Image (cartoon, rainbow, N blue to C red):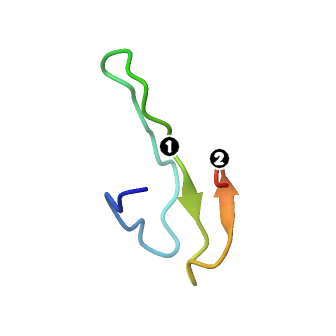
């Protein structure tokens, strides 16, 4: 995994858009970085 962005605490209405089909997968970790909330191994 590559860190792309840090979403600020309290941020709402976050929109993620895939502009073109690809083989990449989005994964989201908790603030402490020790647990995945979405698509982590």
* Res 39 label: 2
- Residue under the point 38% across and 25% down: 18
Placement of 32 over or under 27, stated as above or below: below
Circle 1: element type: loop
Q: Quadrant of the C terminus?
A: bottom right
Q: Is residue 4 left or right of residue 16?
A: left
Q: Which of 33 and 11 lies nearest the eye of the viewer?
A: 33
- Residue under the point 58% across and 84% down: 32
Report which quarter residue 3 is drawn in: bottom left
Circles 2 and 1: CB distance less than 8 Å?
Answer: yes
Compare marks 2 and 1 and give the one earlier in the sequence.
1
Residue 28 position, x and y percent, is 56, 57
* Res 26 label: 1
Report which quarter residue 40 is drawn in: bottom right
Q: Quadrant of the N terminus?
A: bottom left
- Residue under the point 43% across and 25% down: 23
């Amino acid at each position: 995994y590559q860190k792309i962005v840090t979403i600020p605490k309290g941020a709402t209405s976050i929109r993620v858009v895939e502009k073109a089909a690809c083989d990449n997968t989005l994964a989201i970790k908790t603030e402490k970085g020790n647990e995945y909330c979405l698509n982590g191994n």
